[in-house]
């Protein structure tokens, strides 16, 4: 064994194959002398009164010397530390490297000592050959990192992700999966063209919001009796509002406007269209066939034949799919949004926002708060907090749907055909939530 002093550092290298690669005392030499700097810091802590820390050290004896070492003497921080050497350090301030460099011939001096109290080692004169693994600290670090990785993995598992709602319709040509997202992006871009000013009624001198509500509540019943498509009802209401926003109408012609709007919507959406005589009949012959055709011509010219507008129904279907709705949620959502059609004040909300709020309110009504998922938020573009005010208004409409004179929507959805959706208890707790 040769020790050299280069740059104040001790290097221990094998002198032959037996010393470098063989077993010494049943243990490899290279495994016995690692991490000497950590051992010194531990010994220094012990000398300063700190609690002992288990470590592996080499038993290397150094005779005491009170002489002065030369200027190239090794600092204690660069020398292997043993318990006997620690005891000597406590009584001597200087050590000579010449004595430290004396060759050792006995292999017993490389015995690994367990960190036991020095007094016990001196009294019994034996050491327990049960070393603490040098990789203990590293193992603890690895275990901590593994635990942290497991925690991150668990967080990833429970973190809500956006669901691909179109994956199951890839083979359905009617679902147009390839460009359905582009379609709805276009709908949201163009929905402003289908909206009207929420204050347009001030331009009307002979009608008001209450008359509009009576008309639409009656048309919902007519729509139900004729068993028309849902799209027809929403387009009918849209045509009425867009026409009244541009054209002044006297009170006695308001019902005619509603009938003609439904006729146009049927021509646009239905396969089997009601004839004009049927519309005259349900109006109790208040209008003639000629009057119906004249109003149809006036309405088309006023609206510039623009019938292709995104209504709340267009967004309802998409958002219900994002909500992974069942039949119960779907019926309640349509019940709530049809209540909104009757209310003039709901014109301040865009169709997509109104559809999302109706579905969110229906979810809360059936299943409690906090049902608006990341998938719903992604496809609608609205968070639950954004829709809270609108949801509160919808809850109010739901609460009074069975009272008063305008009960057409409640009667429609209080039937077995619509699953008695109107009987659901309103989500009153939404009204009690403090504003954000």
Image (cartoon, helix red, strand yellow):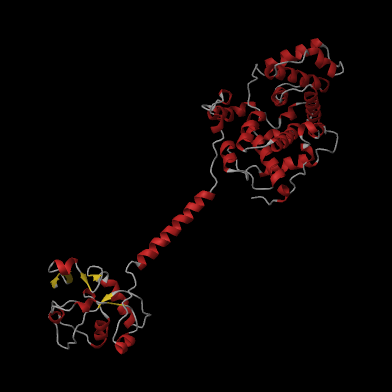
Residue at left offset 66%, top offset 30%: 312
Residue 230 on image: x %, y % = 71, 26
Q: Nearer the viewer, residue 393 or 226?
A: 226
Residue 16 on image: x %, y % = 12, 68
Look at the image and tell me whether residue 105 can be seen: yes
Based on the displayed image, in which of its 4 quarters is residue 247 positioned? top right
Q: Is residue 62 left or right of residue 378?
A: left
Q: Is residue 46 left or right of residue 374?
A: left
| Image quadrant where one finds the N terminus | bottom left
Q: Is residue 187 above or below residue 152?
A: above
Residue at left offset 76%, top offset 15%: 274
Q: Nearer the viewer, residue 303 or 386?
A: 386
Residue 253 on image: x %, y % = 81, 19
Q: Is residue 97 above or below residue 389?
A: below
Q: Is residue 276 left or right of residue 82?
A: right
Based on the displayed image, in which of its 4 quarters is residue 224 positioned? top right
Look at the image and tell me whether residue 195 can be seen: no
Residue 145 on image: x %, y % = 41, 59
């Amino acid at each position: 064994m040769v020790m050299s002093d280069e740059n104040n550092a001790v290097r221990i290298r094998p002198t032959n194959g037996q010393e470098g690669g063989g077993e010494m005392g049943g243990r490899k030499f290279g495994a016995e002398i690692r991490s000497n700097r950590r051992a010194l810091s531990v010994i220094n802590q012990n000398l300063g009164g700190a609690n002992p820390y288990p470590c592996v050290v080499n038993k290397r004896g150094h005779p005491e010397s009170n002489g002065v070492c030369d200027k190239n003497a090794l600092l204690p921080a660069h020398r292997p530390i043993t318990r006997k050497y620690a005891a000597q350090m406590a009584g001597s301030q200087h050590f000579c490297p010449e004595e430290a460099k004396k060759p050792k011939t006995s292999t017993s001096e490389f015995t690994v000592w367990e960190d036991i109290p020095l007094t016990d080692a001196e009294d019994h004169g034996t050491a327990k050959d049960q070393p603490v693994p040098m990789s203990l600290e590293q193992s603890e670090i690895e275990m901590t990192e593994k635990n942290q990785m497991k925690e991150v993995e668990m967080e990833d598992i429970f973190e809500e992700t956006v669901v691909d709602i179109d994956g199951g319709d890839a083979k359905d040509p009617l679902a147009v999966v390839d460009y359905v997202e582009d379609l709805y992006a276009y709908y949201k871009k163009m929905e402003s063209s289908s909206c009207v000013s929420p204050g347009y009624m001030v331009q009307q001198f002979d009608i008001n919001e209450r008359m509009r509500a009576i008309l639409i509540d009656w048309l919902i019943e007519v729509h139900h009796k004729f068993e028309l498509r849902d799209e027809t009802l929403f387009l009918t209401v849209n045509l009425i509002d867009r026409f009244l926003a541009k054209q002044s109408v006297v009170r006695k012609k308001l019902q005619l406007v509603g009938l003609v709007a439904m006729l146009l919507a049927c021509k646009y959406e239905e396969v089997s269209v009601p004839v004009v005589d049927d519309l005259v009949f349900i109006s109790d012959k208040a209008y003639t066939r000629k009057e119906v055709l004249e109003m149809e011509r006036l309405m088309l010219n006023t609206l510039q034949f623009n019938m292709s507008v995104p209504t709340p129904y267009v967004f309802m279907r998409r958002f219900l799919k994002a909500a992974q709705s069942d039949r119960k949620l779907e019926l309640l959502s349509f019940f709530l949004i049809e209540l909104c059609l009757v209310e003039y004040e709901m014109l301040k909300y865009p169709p997509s926002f109104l559809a999302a709020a109706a579905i969110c309110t229906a979810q809360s009504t059936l299943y409690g708060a906090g049902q608006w998922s990341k998938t719903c938020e992604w496809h609608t573009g609205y968070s639950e907090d954004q829709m809270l005010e609108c949801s509160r208004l919808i809850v109010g409409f739901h609460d009074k749907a069975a009272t008063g004179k305008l009960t057409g929507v409640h009667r429609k959805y209080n039937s077995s055909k619509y699953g008695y959706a109107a009987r659901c208890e309103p989500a009153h707790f939404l009204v009690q939530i403090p504003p954000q």
